[in-house]
């Protein structure tokens, strides 16, 4: 029976609305759909009526057929123009909201590599191809790729952002509905592209706390926080040989670096941010701080994207305008895990 | 039978003894020809073969996706198949299709010239195209390529182990072929118009090609250089795009789309030209707002260069940059809307004949409307975030490029087939194929909009992570097989008509335009004397047309298989 055959298939008409963006997103989507359907119907009716009415051999008034009409041309140029501009402003407004995260949003790191999503929570929990988040919290994903371009896509949240090697990209969301939703890699990235995905688990705060307390239900490679791992790396690579708590002849200090404006030998200036810290480790010759020569070697071949994130997290704690001095957060296990 | 009441136009004009088809029968006379019409036929045969290859690959993709875990292909094989489908369809079918076949055949005839400005360059274009095609085939034989037709760095430059370099070489050569065609058209249209053929008497088809040629000669060199850069990075490890070598992967996307977005207009503008010709002829009306339709082609070509960044909203480019691209992308939709309104109004008070080319033209308008309007979802930034790189995009660009460009190509081939071959085809089968194509097309690609909105990413071999997409894949695959029937039919009845079709005479449709004043098939020199143009294009009179009957009308009312054999 065709009915039961169809019933075997799930025929969903829209993805779940599971983030704060989903509702305003769908409003724009359906408004655009209404507009699209309207224009299709108008033109199709117009054409059908004309074709039937003026079919060859059918009696009709064909005299003085107009071949141009300025007012009509202006009207059907102006009306789509106004509608298009309206859509542009509405849509751009939502886009800007989606691109500017709240200041206190919780940062979670995402590293894309062929063919897996690595996720690093600030308290040390790491996950692969799964992302656990609490409902109703602003979450900011800071993302970078290890090899080729990937794209982190959660349809239920109506959000997607390319994950690019060599630069940090970001997206943020506030999940509104507990549940399990698919994560896809949306940018073609090679052989197993279609298998690079997983699920985001949106949990109530209580469930999330429990999950976190259990260390994410899984054996972790390490139970150190990113800051602690950064500190270990900082020591392993002996960064303190040159970078100490004040500028020296060997190198500028990293204390209070993040957020501070740097003057470079070529006369340019830049606010030291995540991107700058990464660049200074990977290609230190690119921006030389005023008064210093190009003496630092590149760590490009020794360091992975995860380690770069940890180093940044540690350097960020080394004093500075909005940060406390290093001692407190550099301590090791803060998660209270049982291992 | 109404045919008995009028004279048979085919009988009026004596068949010319020598035409471009029978002027030389050796293979060499074809392979060394400098006649734009013969080169057009060479192209028609070659693009048809590539279209068949590309369609076969599409069929494999659609069949594979019936099950969430695939039906028969390995990941790598699947990736190579969709890459080749894209490369073959874009570089070897869609871009050359209308310009190199119908454009080559018709532009000199429409403007009253004996040939294109550079006949040898024209032949060279075809050879470059064929060599490019052969290189592509070698690349397939040596293992194929798996980068997607967009060749995104650093995957294509550093990570892919497939035949990227060879395929890039093929695309590079195909690009030069199209640059030469573009130069040839621009010079021809500027310098070789017959006396009296002013710019505003040019058929809109010629305007469409003129705009296209501007895009070709400005845009194609950029993609050629970009592909060379990719090749240099891949083979010599020069750092352009890969961060490991000090490059920027998003730079590749900017350079690539600077050409490849306007390339969509290379595919669609000549198609719009075809539609303008067909709608006016089969409505027996001067086109409504000639100047607006002509200038909208130029506007599309010009604005088309400023919208590439809408492919990069989620690439990490600045959101302010995105907004500039968004607003210009909305603007480029407007000249397209103007064209659709003008075409629709052209039918008003016309004398409409629903013959095969008109059936295709109406089908084009329906599909292009959907394709164009769904572009709005992708030009607006917020909606694009969710939809980009999903099947929504796949559906959108197939509606524009396959629904639009291929319907126009088929409409054009049906319209000018009698001119090119001197033969009429079976009108009933023609209309049937147009209808099947239209239905099959919608069944294939409408479900993909829904699938894309649900979140199905494009270029996915599997969807077992979220099998909800399956019902839409099944519908789409079913549609693809209906579509295949629609596309295959013309190949048979058109070839059949070569032997069994009725003689077309110079002007079986009762159309205006210089190409219809010369015998079918035209002599090698196109015109015995260079025509002098005294009237504007499309000087149709619908009231008069009501009293006229053409050969096509007669065949439509009196078709029988026996009659066709005469």
Image: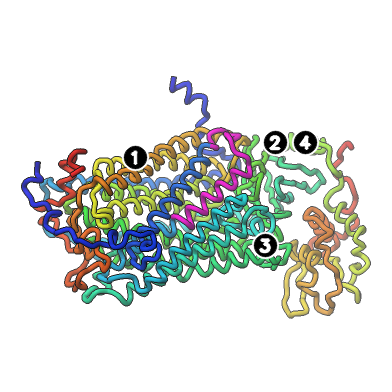
Q: Which residue is mark 1?
A: B436
Quadrant housing residue A134: top right
Q: CA distance from mark 4 to mark 1?
A: 56 Å
Q: Which residue is mark 3?
A: B234
Q: Quadrant of the C terminus of chain B?
A: top left
Front: mark 4 or 1? 1
Front: mark 4 or 3? 3
Quadrant housing residue B270: bottom left
Q: At x 15% / y 41%, what residue is drawn? A: B558
- Compare marks 4 and 2 and give the one earlier in the sequence: 2
| Element type at mark 1 | helix
Q: CA distance from mark 3 to mark 1?
A: 45 Å
Q: Which chain does the residue under circle 1 lie in?
A: B
Q: Give the magenta part as a residue range.
A: B64-93
Q: Residues within 10 Å of mark 4 (few under 14, many from 20)?
A: some
Residue B45 in sight from this viewpoint: yes
From this viewpoint, which residue is outermost toward the top? Answer: A1
Q: Is residue A309 magenta?
A: no
Say left or right for B14 vs B416.
left
Q: Which mark is residue A204?
A: 2
Residue B234 image position (x, y, % from top left): 67, 62
Specify whether disc 4 shares its chain with disc 2.
yes
- Prevalent SS, magenta region: helix
Q: CA distance from mark 4 to mark 3?
A: 46 Å
């Amino acid at each position: 029976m065709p009915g039961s055959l169809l019933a075997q298939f799930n025929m969903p008409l829209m993805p779940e609305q599971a983030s704060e963006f989903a509702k305003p997103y769908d409003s724009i989507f359906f408004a655009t759909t209404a507009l699209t359907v309207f224009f299709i119907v108008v033109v199709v009716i117009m054409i059908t009526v004309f074709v039937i009415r003026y079919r060859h051999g059918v009696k009709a008034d064909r005299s003085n057929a107009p071949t141009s009409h300025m007012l009509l041309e202006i009207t059907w140029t102006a009306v789509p123009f106004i509608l298009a501009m309206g859509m542009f402003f509405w849509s751009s407004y939502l886009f800007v909201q989606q691109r500017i995260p709240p200041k206190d949003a919780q940062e979670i790191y995402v590293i894309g590599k062929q063919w897996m999503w690595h996720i690093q929570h600030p308290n040390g929990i790491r996950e692969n191809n799964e992302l656990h988040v609490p409902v109703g919290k602003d979450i900011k994903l800071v993302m970078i790729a290890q090899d080729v371009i990937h794209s982190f896509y959660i349809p239920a949240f109506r959000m997607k952002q390319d994950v690019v090697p060599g630069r940090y990209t970001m997206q943020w969301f506030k999940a509104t509905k507990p549940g399990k939703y698919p994560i896809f890699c949306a940018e073609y990235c090679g052989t197993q592209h279609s298998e690079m995905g997983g699920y985001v688990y949106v949990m109530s705060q209580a469930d999330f706390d429990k999950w976190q307390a259990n260390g994410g239900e899984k054996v972790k490679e390490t139970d150190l926080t990113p800051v602690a791992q950064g500190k270990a790396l900082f020591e392993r690579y002996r960064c303190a040989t040159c970078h100490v708590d004040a500028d020296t002849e060997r190198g500028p200090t990293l204390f209070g670096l993040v957020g501070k404006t740097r003057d470079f030998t070529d006369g340019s200036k830049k606010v030291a941010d995540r991107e700058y810290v990464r660049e200074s480790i990977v290609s230190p010759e690119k921006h030389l701080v005023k008064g210093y020569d190009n003496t630092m070697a590149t760590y490009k071949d020794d360091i992975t994207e995860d380690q770069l994130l940890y180093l940044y997290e540690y350097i960020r704690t080394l004093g500075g305008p909005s940060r406390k001095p290093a001692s407190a957060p550099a301590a090791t296990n803060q998660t209270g895990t049982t291992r | 039978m109404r045919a008995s009441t009028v004279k048979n136009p085919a009988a009026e004009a004596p068949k010319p003894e020598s035409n471009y088809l029978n002027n030389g029968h050796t293979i060499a006379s074809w392979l060394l020809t400098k006649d734009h019409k013969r080169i057009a036929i060479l192209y028609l045969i070659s693009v048809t073969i590539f279209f068949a290859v590309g369609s076969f690959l599409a069929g494999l993709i659609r069949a594979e996706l019936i099950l969430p875990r695939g039906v028969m292909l390995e990941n790598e094989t699947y990736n190579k198949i969709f890459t080749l489908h894209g490369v073959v369809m874009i570089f070897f079918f869609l871009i050359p299709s209308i310009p190199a076949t119908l454009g080559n055949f018709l532009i000199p005839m429409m403007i009253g010239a004996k040939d294109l400005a550079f006949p040898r360059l024209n032949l060279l274009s075809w050879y470059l195209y064929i060599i490019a095609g052969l290189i592509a085939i070698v690349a397939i034989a040596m293992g194929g390529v798996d980068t997607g037709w967009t060749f995104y760095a650093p995957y294509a430059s550093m990570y892919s182990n497939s035949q990227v370099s060879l395929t890039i070489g093929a695309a590079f050569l195909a690009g030069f072929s199209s640059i030469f065609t573009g130069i040839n058209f621009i010079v021809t249209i500027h310098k070789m118009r017959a006396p009296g053929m002013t710019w505003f008497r040019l058929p809109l088809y010629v305007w469409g090609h003129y705009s296209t040629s501007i895009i070709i000669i400005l845009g194609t060199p950029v993609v050629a250089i970009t592909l060379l850069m990719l090749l240099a990075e891949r083979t010599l490890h020069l750092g352009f795009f890969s961060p490991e070598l000090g490059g920027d992967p998003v730079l590749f996307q900017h350079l690539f789309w600077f050409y490849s977005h306007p390339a969509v207009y290379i595919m669609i503008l000549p198609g719009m030209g075809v539609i303008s010709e067909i709608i006016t002829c089969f409505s027996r009306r001067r086109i409504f707002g000639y100047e607006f339709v002509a200038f909208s082609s130029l506007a599309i070509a010009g604005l088309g260069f400023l919208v590439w960044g809408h492919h990069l909203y989620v690439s990490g480019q600045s959101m302010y940059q995105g907004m500039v691209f968004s607003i210009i992308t909305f603007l480029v939709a407007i000249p397209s809307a103007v064209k659709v309104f003008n075409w629709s109004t052209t039918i008003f008070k016309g004398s409409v004949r629903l013959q095969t080319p008109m059936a295709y033209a109406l089908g084009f308008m329906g599909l292009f409307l959907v394709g164009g309007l769904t572009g709005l979802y992708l030009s607006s930034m917020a909606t694009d975030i969710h939809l980009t790189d999903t099947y929504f995009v796949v559906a959108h660009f197939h509606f524009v490029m396959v629904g639009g460009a291929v319907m126009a190509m088929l409409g054009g081939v049906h319209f000018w087939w009698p001119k090119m071959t001197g033969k009429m085809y079976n009108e009933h089968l023609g209309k049937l194929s147009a209808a099947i194509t239209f239905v099959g097309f919608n069944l294939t690609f409408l479900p993909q909009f829904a699938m894309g909105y649900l979140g199905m990413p494009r270029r996915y071999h599997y969807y077992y992570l979220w099998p909800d997409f399956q019902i839409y894949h099944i519908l789409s695959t079913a549609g693809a097989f209906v579509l295949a029937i629609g596309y295959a039919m013309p190949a048979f009845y058109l070839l059949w008509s070569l032997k069994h079709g009725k003689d077309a005479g110079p002007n079986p449709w009762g159309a205006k335009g210089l190409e219809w004043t010369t015998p079918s098939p035209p002599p090698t020199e196109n015109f015995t004397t260079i025509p002098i143009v005294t009237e504007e294009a499309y000087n149709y009179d619908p009231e008069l047309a009501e009293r006229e009957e053409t050969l096509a009308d007669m065949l439509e009312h009196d078709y029988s298989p026996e009659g066709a054999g005469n």
